[in-house]
Image (cartoon, rainbow, N blue to C red):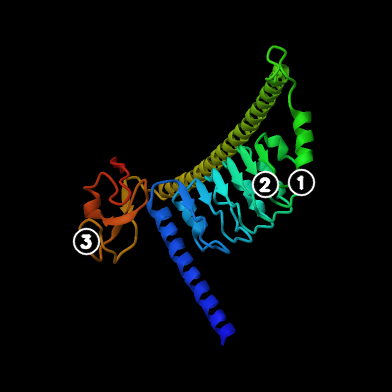
Amino acid sequence: MFPFKSNKANSAAMSASSTKDQAFLQRRLYLAENTPEPIFDLSECGLEQLPPGVLAKCRVFRKTSLLLQHNSLKSLPDLRDLTLLTVLNVSSNLLKTLPDSIGCLVKLEILDLHSNQLTKLPSTMSKLKSLRVLDISNNELSRLPPGVRSLGCEIRAEGCPLLEPLDYKEKNRDSPPASPEHPGATAEAEPDLGNVWERRERMLKELRQEMLDVEERLYELTVNEYEKRDKRQNDNMMNIAQERVELAANLNELILKKEIELSEFRSAGVSTHFEDSGIADRDCVVCLGDGLQLIVLLPCGHVCVCRYCAEKLTVCPLCRQELRTEIAN
């Protein structure tokens, strides 16, 4: 009876604690979504994993600080979308590794990882160029990724016995010599202006060469376009000239045919501008008389009017060509 009561009491206590954590989490989410402060605070909510949509809300509401300390998180999701984040606090959790996407937080200035179970850090942390404070205290780290020390940030490694002697040596080795005027101060390294000017001249030279290449390519394209246009114009001119030659040949053929017809009329003794055609039973196009003897009009040779109408015409009613008006004796 007693063990059963004890288990029942423990279950009730855990249920009450879970309900309390859920209520606390909902309140934190409400505050994060409805306050203008750039802080998304989900600390001390008893989280074992991040609720769905937290990172999306952090990005949509443009939060720059994400506080997840004092939870039970064992892993972190993909962080590549949190590019506005400047503060990330995941201390006092159960993290053993960090996602490689942490290197995408290019604006991150403070990264608090203390009191976790980290055994190594991702190599992408060397991309955090804006980092000022890195707290990895009380972890199981034995070394730092390459490039992290060159970031120039403050590294706190208390509780990492394998890192502390190394930090001391690196600090003594990398610290600049003291200034002779101020023994307690460190001398600032002067910039190498010669290298700066060499890089500048090299960049200008490469830029000029690229501009020359672009101009040469543009010239080649322009020449090619002009050549294509000239070729199209020449082809069009040749086509037009060929059409003109064909039209002239057809016109000469037509003129020759008409001259042959006129010579035949003259050899037949036709001396006026109209003669009987010998074609009957056709309508005159002028008076519309039917069954009349039609007349051949000269010089066009059309047979379309009767003799009565032909005597009054000066042009052919079909082709409008002027007719001969003289009458031979």
Relative height, residue 122 to residue 48 (above, below): above
Disc 2 secondary structure class: loop
At label 3, the amino acid type is Leu
Q: Secondary structure at mark 1?
A: loop
Residue 124 placement (x, y as % from top left): 69, 47
Residue farthest to the top, as pictured: 181
Secondary structure category for the residue under label 3: loop
Q: At x 46% / y 48%, what residue is drawn?
A: 39
Q: Amino acid at mark 1?
A: Pro
Return the disc, 3 or 1, that comes first in the chain's sequence: 1
Residue at mark 2: 137
Q: Do the numbered discs 3 and 1 sit on residues whose CB atoms are within 8 Å?
A: no
* Residue 161: numbered disc: 1
Q: Nearer the viewer, mark 2 or mark 3?
A: 2
The quadrant of the rendering that contains the C terminus is top left
Task: Give the quadrant of residue 203.
Answer: top right
Quarter in which the N terminus is drawn: bottom right
Classify residue 243 as left or right of residue 282.
right
Q: Nearer the viewer, mark 3 or mark 1?
A: 1
Closest to the observer: 5 or 284? 5
Q: Which mark is residue 288?
A: 3
Asked whether 320 or 42 is in front, the reply is 42
